[in-house]
Image: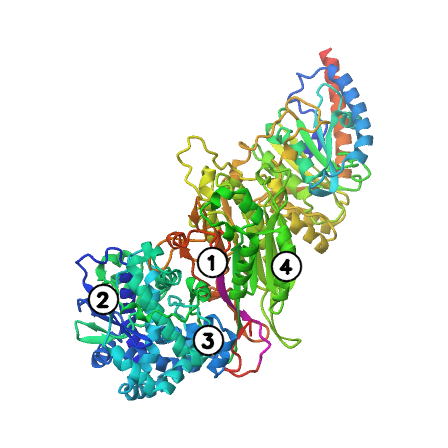
Amino acid sequence: MICSLLFYALYPLSRYLTAGRRSEDSQKGLSPAVVHGTAAWDGCAVTTKRFTQSQTTQPDQWLSSSSTAKGKTEEGMKEGSPDKEGDTGMEQNKEQPVAVPHKEPKNGETKMSEEPQSEATKTSEEPQSEATKTSEEPQSEARTTDEEPQSEAKETSEEPQSEAKETSEEPQSEAVKTSKEPQNEAMMTSEVPQGKMEVSMQQNINTKEATDVPSEDINPEQALAAHIKWLQTDASIKETDCPGLEEIQIHTPTHSVEELVISAEERIEQTACSGEQQTQIPSMESETPAVSEVTECWDEYYINPAADEEYDGANSSKLVFCEHSQTHLTISKPCNTQNSLHFPAGLGLAGEIECPLWQFPAGSYYPPLESPESFEVMWRVWQSLPAAEPALIPFPFTKTSLNFTVMSYNVLAQDLLEANEELYIHCPLEVLDWSYRCSLLLEEIFKWAPDILCLQEVQENHYHEQLYPVLCQMGYTCVYKRRTGPKTDGCATCYRSSCFSEVSVSLLEFFRPDTELLNRHNVGIVLLLRPVVTQGSEIKAMGPPLCVGNTHLLFNPRRGDVKLAQLAMMLAEIDSTVKSCKAKGEHCNIVLCGDFNSVPNMPLYQLITTGTLYYRGLPAWMVSGQEDLSFKTHFHRLSVPLWHSCLGITDNCQYSASKNTFENKDQTSGKLHYSHDFMRQLRYCPAACVRPVDLKLIQGVTDNAPDPSLENPSYDTCSRHTLTHCLDLESVYQHVLPGSGAPEVTTVHSEVGATVDYIFYSPRRSSTSAQTACGNFVSEGLELIGSLCLLSEDVLWSMNGLPNHMFPSDHLSLVAKFQLDLNSPAIGKTVGEVGGIDVRG
Amino acid sequence: MNNKFDALKDDDSGDHDQDQGSPKDSEKEKIEDEDKDQNSTRKKMVVPGAGEHPLQYNYTFWYSRRTPGRPASTQSYEQNIKQIGSFASVEQFWRFYSHMIRPGDLTGHSDFHLFKEGIKPMWEDDANKMGGKWIIRLRKGLASRCWENLILAMLGEQFMVGEEICGAVVSVRFQEDIISIWNKTASDQATTARIRDTLRRVLNLPPNTIMEYKTHTDSIKYVQCVTFRRSFLAEIDYANQK
């Protein structure tokens, strides 16, 4: 309960801070709250926040919460103990495995070795956020109490313990603290990129640093133990139900617990350095490459006010977690609605919090150990989202889940590069060399080791000669589809054979000679995969089918109509794939990625993410939003209907009845069945508008002329101007860099920098849990649990644009990590035996 | 009323006869000849085009308009009916349909018939002689929509009665329009019931709509009777006029 109370008190506060940090005009005077960040460096760093706030607002937030006052007093009682929150976090972490019927292997090291790249570092940062995460948990459970009385009971039963522990730990909290602080630091920095606001955070190097270092030396075991706990907590990501939380973590190649402390130190050093240089970002060319990279890296962090904060010096507690600006936290949680009174989740708080500039110690902390190569990894920051919904699973049931990563990458075909050299005049020649780019590309793939790899602009000969052999060696099964027409590139979808078995492959050609709208040579690939977890040769578990779409839509910014038609074909194929699964009683998860040549929040994107687009009269250029061509006096507007119904695709982005018709044929006495709707779609197809040669002209009988525009407005009006689809798709990326608020870009060349690549996925909705035949509860949909941060255009130009010596294409790779529930055969296993299975394990 | 409709196939209720003269007859003969030719060739020729959506059966559109001033008889009915064209796919269907005036806009005393290729829209046809039809009378203004719904259901094989369906007819009359669907076996009550239910569904008919089933043999008897009387009266009429 203490934990939960603490959470009640702290959560909004941290939200406030978070929101405030987005503040653009944060340096204007009138802020009711002032945040001072202080950082201590001890090989780790302590960030201290002083939170000055008008006290009245605090109680107000909690008017409707019965535990508010209590939480406040608790807080008050503990004031002056800067480690309190951290301790709470620790205790919560201990509770976690109990509260959640989903337990990790005890050995944190095992877990780490499973995910050498991302998880290891994540764990070192996680605890703080985990703390808050867990502290949020009681609340969510309270609301879903009936579902999980048991775990709650356990939780409460542990409270005294935790409290005891807390107090006992406080005297020697330094040790814990030191191990925690680096994470705090990391979190703190990682919070920065969130909003659009300029962050100016004052981080003072605390004198604590001095004391912290020795204390860690004194108590290393404890710190290590803490790490292990965090590891466990981290691994059980799906447990808590706090969608808003997320951590950004630095991606360092740490492999074991032993290295953790060291790596944390290193990271902090880097962070410190970058902090110093923060003001120099625009002019960082003067720095050594490595340093400037770190500087940018810093930008990707969240900053977490970790150590302690005081309310007018009266209350002190630590703020522990950060959150994403785009989270859907505000949807359901009462506390959030309360928060929204004072802490609007959006950017509105901008002016209320003043965040002075960070001040780091001298650059002596800069880590010279890291080689420039590894900074390549550091450049883009892995950001993981905690996924959780333990309360939904009734206690006796077990759940197995599977994590997999997806990469979408437009690799820039060499032929296209050479055909459009003017786009790459900013590049040194050597980075345009294919063999050089190829090695970087393979390095990138190797580095992130995606389980599913969707490549665009893969040149046919390069694919067969270079990429395919290597990818095969890496354990991928590859499907390649070259574009029709003269262009030599195409799409390739590769999946790790050890994780997925292939159910079906559809290679789509968007070129239709008979349809003017589809006279462009773009292609797509739709795979239906079955996730499998094997142990030896035995299949241990199978997941629900996964439909993976990969496409590269037409570039031409003026032809939004063509893009829409191509997208519709893609969606129709996915839809039919999903339906084929549904026919077998299975839910099919969807990942749709590729280069859509359309920018976020423009009509094409809207259609994908919202499922609806009213397109009548829309200027064709506007569909993609790549360029603003509104200055042109004459531009093509989308007409109705967008494509002829004989394309066989409806305005719902589904195949029209034809396919179903032939399916029906088997079921019903071998007859060809057509619905009215289907036949009416063909009414004005070109073939039907030609007068039959043998039709005699009889005045008043056969002298009618078909007029598509006039006929039958009655039953066509509603559907005809709107494109829809019924796939539930969400973008992995939010298209705005957390912290700076600068737009993310996925491509940069001399003419444009924009987001045009996406990974869309079918998200897990809380209502879609279903009990499977074998008694397990399996939730439908994918849980996004991490992604590789994109960069801003400025940052990329600071690296001399794309491609460069780090990124071999004029696009960046997109990487996302998902979790799905398996139809586990693990019936009868007790809780705790079934844990998360990582694909790569 | 039933009787009236049945008789309408070739009756003359005296609505619009005055404007038609004897020249029509020779013209009609020619058409009939041509139709015969077309029949023989079309049966082999009509196939779905590439990429088109084939229909389960090929169908033929027919058009008939009562020729006034001429004694009604079985033969004159057959001569009076014109073949518009045959089709084998959904697309080909629309080609014809789109170039035809919608039933609601037809003038005079006209019928559109849509029958499976090879079945003549006559009671006497082998496919029809044991059959019957469901009849729905529509007030003016509804025929176009109902006709379209009816034939789409037929072409799309929505009646689910195997080979039973023969064709459909829309008859434009003075005060009302009539649509009907013909099937092969009047005595097959399961089939006729299923057709009736499907009709209600696809035409979206209100529950109180009156639907009549009429066997063709009844129609023939009635019409023969009526025809005899009518032609008798007409002759007397004719004699009187003279």
Q: Is residue A571 visible?
A: no
Label drawn at residue A806? 1
Q: Nearer the viewer, mark 4 or mark 3?
A: 4
Whole-number angstrom distance, CA of label 3 to CA of label 1: 31 Å
Label drawn at residue A503? none
Residue at image mark 4:
A468
Task: Give the magenta range.
Answer: A813-827
Along the line of sight, the residue nearer the viewer: A78 or A572: A78
Q: Is residue A824 magenta?
A: yes
Q: Quadrant of residue A789?
A: bottom left
Do tags 4 and 3 sit on the same chain? yes
Whole-number angstrom distance, CA of label 4 to CA of label 3: 33 Å
Q: Secondary structure at mark 4?
A: helix
Q: Amino acid at mark 1?
A: Met
Q: Earlier in the sequence, mark 4 or mark 2?
A: 2
Q: Nearer the viewer, mark 1 or mark 2?
A: 1
Q: Is residue A189 visible?
A: yes
Q: Residues within 10 Å of mark 3 (few under 14, many from 20)?
A: many
Q: Amino acid at mark 3?
A: Ala
Chain ID of residue with mark 2: A
